[in-house]
Amino acid sequence: MFERTYDTTKSGRGAAGRTEPGRLTLGALRHLAAILFILSIPLALITTNIRYVANESRVYRYAIDSFDGVQRTGISRDELLRGGDELRRYFNSNEEPLTIRVERQGREVSLFNAAESSHLKDVKARFNLMNRVQELSILYGLTYIAVVVLWAREVTLRRLAVQVAAGCLVIMAAVVATAAIGLSGFDQAWEGFHELTFSGNWRFNTQTDRLIQMFPPDFWQSIVFFIGLMIVAQAALILIAAGVYLGVTGRRETNQNLKPYYA
């Protein structure tokens, strides 16, 4: 009789048939790395678009020109635009406190009062945090592609395309859900966002406070919609590209499998 033997040296299971702890941990880490990559795509899209809008001078011009900034504040357009330029520089610098002086009715005055400056300091801190999240999400995504896909080859390009598509679907679903909440009541949603994100000093008087006069709620509603539209458009383009790649490579594999065999 032949004696049946088993080679367990290359298996991921022990003598009792159980998965070895090391193999289980390695598999869990692979799954975690893939999930983090999928989530890095929404994070990168959201933070990149917000960062772009926050630093785009045309957005500040749009706020002043389309929402009666000059009439609301009593400050000339040129002075408001200069104040917007200085505000952008403040957000991208380490300087404190915020001091923006403008000319109003022949007198030099501070553009923002103490409460507004305090809120803008909080906004700056959130921007700095968001910028780090953007940089880390992009760095992680590129590292995942370079190490896991191209170097270790643990993930195929087709699998990578599936993961990219999954990340795009996640962000598109999140934007649609956010849009539904906003359409049901933007003012309430905007207030809830501020209550969740900021500690205080974010309620302002439309008659006296220039921050809300320059950037009224209607402006924020249009900007949030614009950012959401950009994110969905970019995610859709990436999703289409991933789908085209999967379709082309899938047909190629099918054609190779259907090649005639000659004895």
Image: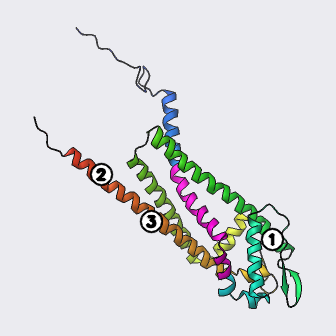
Q: Position of residue 177 (x, y in %)?
A: 53, 68
Q: CA distance from mark 2 to mark 1?
A: 56 Å
Q: SS for tag 1? A: loop
Q: CA distance from mark 1 to mark 3?
A: 38 Å
From the image, tell me which residue sits under label 1.
201
Graded by Cα atoms within 10 Å as few (under 14), some (14 to 19) or many (20 or more), the crowding at tag 2 reads few
From the image, tell me which residue sits under label 2.
250
Q: SS for tag 3? A: helix
From the image, tell me which residue sits under label 3.
236
Tell me which label, 3 or 2, sits earlier in the chain. Answer: 3
Q: Which residues are magenta?
A: 36-62
Q: Is residue 7 left or right of residue 33?
A: left
Name the quadrant containing residue 54. bottom right
Mark nearest the camera among 2 and 1 is: 2
Name the amino acid type tagged 2.
Answer: Gly
Q: Is residue 191 left or right of residue 207?
A: left
